[in-house]
Image (cartoon, rainbow, N blue to C red):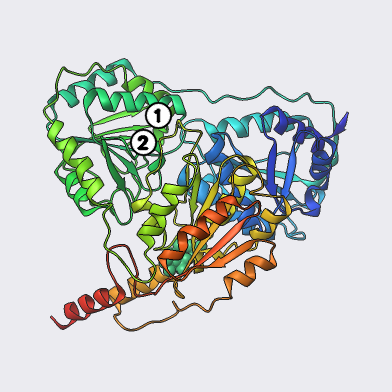
């Protein structure tokens, strides 16, 4: 017999969890005591705010392919964690959020911090959790953990919430934990694969879009062989740029915010789009216009692990329910013809991608050169993280992500556009993979949403392994993305988008980080090299004129165009 809180931690260990992120609460002391009991096998990383902790768990899910784990307390803790849950939902990241709950004999009185989490995060609210369970019986802890793990990974992966009443956690139980759960893998029907082959054989200008979660290295490699066999140009969905080798001659670029206009045109001209794993959300479809909803002009094949995703928005010509772990392997069984009609189309798609990486010099700080310098100097298996804001556009445009096989995901970034994601994600990556360098690129607005996690990094010794931890803050003194939209819609009327910033160098040093301010491109390389050498995390503060609002245009140009349009 041991308290259910201990049984819970044993069940996590059985699932292969060695790290959990969270902020403690008195509602789950018995579980915290379980972490103490098993401290030689599992650690609890105490974060500084539940938003940061939940983002770290999402990063853990993206990096390992198994549920990231986060523990938070009742109402206030759960409310703070909501952003990470939503991020995981939109990214289809496997994750389990444990929430402490008031004792059973206090339920439904609006007891201290009491919330009904089924109502708050229930599947009916669309967008927070695949399932919300509440464990009322200590003997059933192992059953709930196994189901949570399976639910988070199976079909379309995503977050699950498990609610833990305080008295349940302290109840003794002899229940044995259940063995490690592996997700059931859905393979496409042979007939559907034959139909796909016929569609490819009839195509003139096909293109693939890969995205979503649930991929593993073997499936990505197999998908690459399929693309090579058919000479298929491959693009990556918004913030899933690391599922196909960006240096591959078939790579066509990413389909997201700031898409290469030539790639957008190419997708418009394609006669067959094969979407593999991508949810085909608003950002990957150019606001449902690149692929017109609900019936695109291109023939559409949609391959997805979740039956509910197939046909949810798009009436695809062919829908295949298939886990991504199986997708590449299933597709590579399609025997290609000896030659394809579209070889030139594929070559041009890659040439457009390469040409889009050329940049014009910007003074004094050239973000394109900054990203290219990171690419040149950082280890090939580095993890790149970002939150939301225009600053991320340079990274997405100029960084060439390796494909998944080189050691797990290398891009941790929220398709939900959740600000504040990047720093906690980099801290998590660094703690989970001390041998990989984690590099966060943040905006000044983005960074301070979760900047307190600098302390978590310092406290747990992040960046002290062979890999380093580096955060690059691109400081333009504004919520630039919003300013950009403002100038488009209300030129010259700046309202609510200016920012007043601390001295980021002093701030970072106060947290025990190294820090340096870089005002000109020429100084970046030496500072970045020093960061890669330092046995301490480093923040690099890059002031950037707000005028340089994206990698393609300026504030003045946007304002002038908007004013001219208004005068017309
Ligand atoms: C949590 C959250 N709040 C608000 C927004 C809306 N939003 C999107 S981008 C952005 C500004 C980002 O500013 P910054 O990090 O400074 O980057 P910049 O756009 O200036 O490069 C805002 C407020 C959001 N996406 N997420």
Identify whether 410 is placed above or below 487.
Answer: above
Is the C-beta separation of discs 2 and 1 under 8 Å?
A: yes
Nearer to me, 380 or 250: 380
Tell me the residue that label 2 is attached to.
Answer: 244
Nearer to me, 369 or 408: 369
Q: Closer to the N terminus: mark 2 or mark 1?
A: 1
Tell me, yes or no, if residue 71 can be seen here.
no
Find ligand 1 in the image and state its quadrant. Answer: bottom left
Identify whether 100 is placed above or below 230.
Answer: below
Looking at the figure, which quarter contains the N terminus? Answer: top right
Question: Where on the picture, by quarter, is residue 394?
Answer: bottom left
Looking at the figure, which quarter contains the C terminus? Answer: bottom left
Q: Position of residue 508 (x, y in %)?
A: 63, 66
Question: Where on the picture, by quarter, is residue 41?
Answer: top right
Q: Position of residue 171 (x, y in %)?
A: 85, 37
Tell me the residue that label 1 is attached to.
Answer: 220
Helix, strand or loop at disc 2? Answer: loop
Identify whether 443 is placed above or below 309.
Answer: below
In the rendered view, does 104 fall on the left or right side of 80? Answer: right
Q: Position of residue 60 (x, y in %)?
A: 58, 42
């Amino acid at each position: 017999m041991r308290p259910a809180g201990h049984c819970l931690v044993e069940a996590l260990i059985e699932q292969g969890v060695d790290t959990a992120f969270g902020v403690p609460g008195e509602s789950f002391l018995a579980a915290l005591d379980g972490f103490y009991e098993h401290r030689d096998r599992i650690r609890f990383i105490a974060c500084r705010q539940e938003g940061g902790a939940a983002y770290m768990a999402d990063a853990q899910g993206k990096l390992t392919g198994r549920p990231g784990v986060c523990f938070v307390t009742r109402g206030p803790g759960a409310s703070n964690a909501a952003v990470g849950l939503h991020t995981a939902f939109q990214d289809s990241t496997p994750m389990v959020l444990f929430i402490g709950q008031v004792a059973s004999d206090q339920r439904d009185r609006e007891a201290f911090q009491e919330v009904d989490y089924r109502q708050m995060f229930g599947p009916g609210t669309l967008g927070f959790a695949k399932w919300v369970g509440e464990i009322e019986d200590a003997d059933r802890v192992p059953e709930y953990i196994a189901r949570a793990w399976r639910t988070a990974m199976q079909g379309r992966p995503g977050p699950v919430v498990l609610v833990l009443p305080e008295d349940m956690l302290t109840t003794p139980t002899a229940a044995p934990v259940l063995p490690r759960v592996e997700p059931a893998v859905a393979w496409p029907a042979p007939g559907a694969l034959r139909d796909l082959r016929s569609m490819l054989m009839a195509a003139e200008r096909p293109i693939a879009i890969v995205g979503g979660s649930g991929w593993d290295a073997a499936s990505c490699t197999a998908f690459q062989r399929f693309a090579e066999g058919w000479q298929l140009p491959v693009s990556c969905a918004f913030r899933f740029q690391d599922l196909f080798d960006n240096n591959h001659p078939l790579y066509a670029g990413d389909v997201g915010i700031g898409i290469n206009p030539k790639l957008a045109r190419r997708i418009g001209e394609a006669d067959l789009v094969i979407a593999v794993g991508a949810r085909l959300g608003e950002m990957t479809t150019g606001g449902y216009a690149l692929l017109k909803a609900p019936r695109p002009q291109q023939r559409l094949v949609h391959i997805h692990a979740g039956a509910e995703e197939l046909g949810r928005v798009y009436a695809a010509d062919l829908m295949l329910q298939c886990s991504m772990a199986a997708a590449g392997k299933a597709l590579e069984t399609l025997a290609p013809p000896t030659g394809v009609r579209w070889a030139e189309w594929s070559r041009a798609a890659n040439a457009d991608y390469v040409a889009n990486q050329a940049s014009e010099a910007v003074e004094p700080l050239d973000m394109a050169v900054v990203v290219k310098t990171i690419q040149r100097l950082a280890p090939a298996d580095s993890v790149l993280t970002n939150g939301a804001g225009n600053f991320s556009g340079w990274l997405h445009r100029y960084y060439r992500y390796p494909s998944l096989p080189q050691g797990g995901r290398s891009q941790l970034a929220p398709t939900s556009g959740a600000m504040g994601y990047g720093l906690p994600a980099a801290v998590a990556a660094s703690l989970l993979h001390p041998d990989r360098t984690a590099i966060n690129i943040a905006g000044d607005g983005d960074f301070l949403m979760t900047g307190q996690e600098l302390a978590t990094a310092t406290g747990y010794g992040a960046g002290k392994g062979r890999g380093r931890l580096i955060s690059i803050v691109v400081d333009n003194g504004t919520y630039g993305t919003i300013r950009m939209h403002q100038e488009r819609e209300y030129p010259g009327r700046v309202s609510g988008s200016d920012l007043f910033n601390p001295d980021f160098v002093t701030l970072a040093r106060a947290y025990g980080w190294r820090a340096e301010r870089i005002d000109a491109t020429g100084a970046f390389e030496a500072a970045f090299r020093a960061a890669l050498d330092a046995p301490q995390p480093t923040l690099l503060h890059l002031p950037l004129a707000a005028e340089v609002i994206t990698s393609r245009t300026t504030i003045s140009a946007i304002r002038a165009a908007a004013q001219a349009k208004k005068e017309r």
